[in-house]
Amino acid sequence: MPPAVKAGGTSAGAGVAGRGPANPDNGSMEKLREALMKADYTVDGVLEVLGPLAYAALARSESVPALRATGGGSPVETLIRLFLLQQAVDRAAVEAALPVADCLAAGLVVADGGRLRAALDIRPYGDDDGHDWYLVSDLSGGLHAQGQGHPVREDHVLGVGGASTTLAQLTIRDRFGSALDVGTGGGVQALHLSTHVGRVVGTDRNPRALKLAALTQRLSGVEPFDLREGSLFEPVAGEKFDLIVSNPPFVISPDNAAQGGRFVYRDSGLPADEVCRRLVADAHQHLAENGWCQVLANWLHVDGVDWRERVAGWVRDTGCDAWVVQREAQDPAEYVELWLRDSGEYGTPDYPRRYDAWLDYFEQNKVGAIGFGWITLHQAGSDHPLLRLEEISHPVEQPLGPHIPSWFARHDFLRDVDDEELMGRRLAVAPDVRWEQVARPTYEQGSGWGGDSSRISQTEGFMRSADIDPIGAAVVGAADGETPLGEILDAVGERYGIDARSLRGGAIEAIRGLVEDGYLFPVG
């Protein structure tokens, strides 16, 4: 778990037993925020103290380098030891950095003789625009190797993790009037939404999560979130939003069916991938005109059924344009190991039994793999909604949020223009597109190089690449944004001795594909 995060990080783990946090007044939270900032307990301040070696080690849940780096007793070092390293710290040292009485009253720390321990994880968090926030969650269980950490409680509230970072970077950051964060947890997405949305509503079925989200909001100094308890869309019945985001409890486990879920942060209590199906199938009812919904999800790969066929059924009847991207597919064993580690059960006496029962569950349901990815819906009001499902497993450049609306806009353009109209339109090459040729040495006819392959690739965003033949490369290279496509095809046909009508008819689908994937875009 990273010691402090700037719109990124890996999974936080566990919590503490005992009573939940109190509801401190705004004045005490403002005083605490001022103290944290004065101590330079910020993303940049933590990195400066720890240095790259200890910072990277703590992100791997190794605390020894960080302990070595924080022995000076400064306020920021004290807070790193208290909250990030989960150490018992001398009360006098904490009092030099924080208003301890307020922290005790709010349930943020607990007394341990003459020392204090953190009861909650208060972690510096920020974004690329320079916001200094504090994310409140339950304490991490990731420091067990150093004798720290805590068992994960059933109502555990997760900190920032890989999934929440992915969603934050995927989210469209246009200005919106209203947004809904379904399953807000500790308020990670709500913090980001507060920068570009007028009204932020967060829902969660875990009342403890709502308490910590309220602390996150107060400590971060942002406008209050409208926090409501309930499952999925129940707390917002009849309401519509310009933007819906959700990092739901999507883990697929036997505990959902047998016990209603063991951990609220990951288990929905619904069988298989039903929570993700319900979420995306019902979201359109809460989208305003031209509204967006962006959801992270898991889905099953069932033997004999293409995953695209299963997931297409979730979104086909929503009336929205839908884009489903699978980023990876894990085999059942990898998946079980990931989530047993996440809940702190790796290496415990019960680990083999739970592992075995989970594999039994997947075997009984003929599950060959579990897919992870994202689903984007757009309430565009089209009579012929777009539906695209694809795999993008190669590296991409985050944040992807700025690229999402343009992807839908290009598909809107292609949907509205027929082949004949397209020939009269002007297309341009996207600025990040590069043309690459790969050659190999040829010795059969003397020394020299022979052409082997030609590709176009993107250097930003989705970073796609595709093979392209010389004719295609000539067409793309001539797309200057001023010459109509038909004229370009005619000129290329003449150059290569190809009948113009034949080339126009044969190239049209390839041209549409180049626009779809962002190599070309329409001008004007």
Image (tube, grey):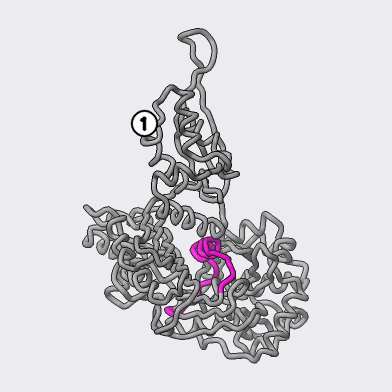
Q: Is residue 404 left or right of residue 349?
A: right
Residue 68 seen from this side = yes
Please state the extent of the stretch shown in magenta in the rendering: 154-176
Establish if 70 lies above or below 517: below
Establish if 296 lies above or below 444: below
Where on the picture, by quarter, is residue 153?
bottom left
Q: Which residue is found at the position 35% from the left and 67% from the top? A: 319
Q: Nearer the viewer, residue 19 or 248?
A: 248
- Quadrant the N terminus occupies: bottom right
Q: Is residue 165 magenta?
A: yes
Q: Which residue is found at the position 61% from the left and 61% from the top? A: 58
Q: Is residue 283 magenta?
A: no
Where on the picture, by quarter, is residue 79?
bottom right
Residue topped by disc 1: 502
Identify which amino acid the numbered label 1 is placed on.
Ser
Q: Residue furthest top?
A: 446
Establish if 450 lies above or below 146: above
Whole-percent x and y of residue 65? 66, 59
Whole-percent x and y of residue 116? 66, 81
Whole-percent x and y of residue 19? 51, 88
Where on the picture, by quarter, is residue 198?
bottom right
Badge 1 marks a residue whose secondary structure is: helix
Residue 455 seen from this side = no
Number of marks present in the image shown: 1
Q: Which residue is found at the position 48% from the left and 85% from the top? A: 228
Q: Nearer the viewer, residue 359 or 394?
A: 394
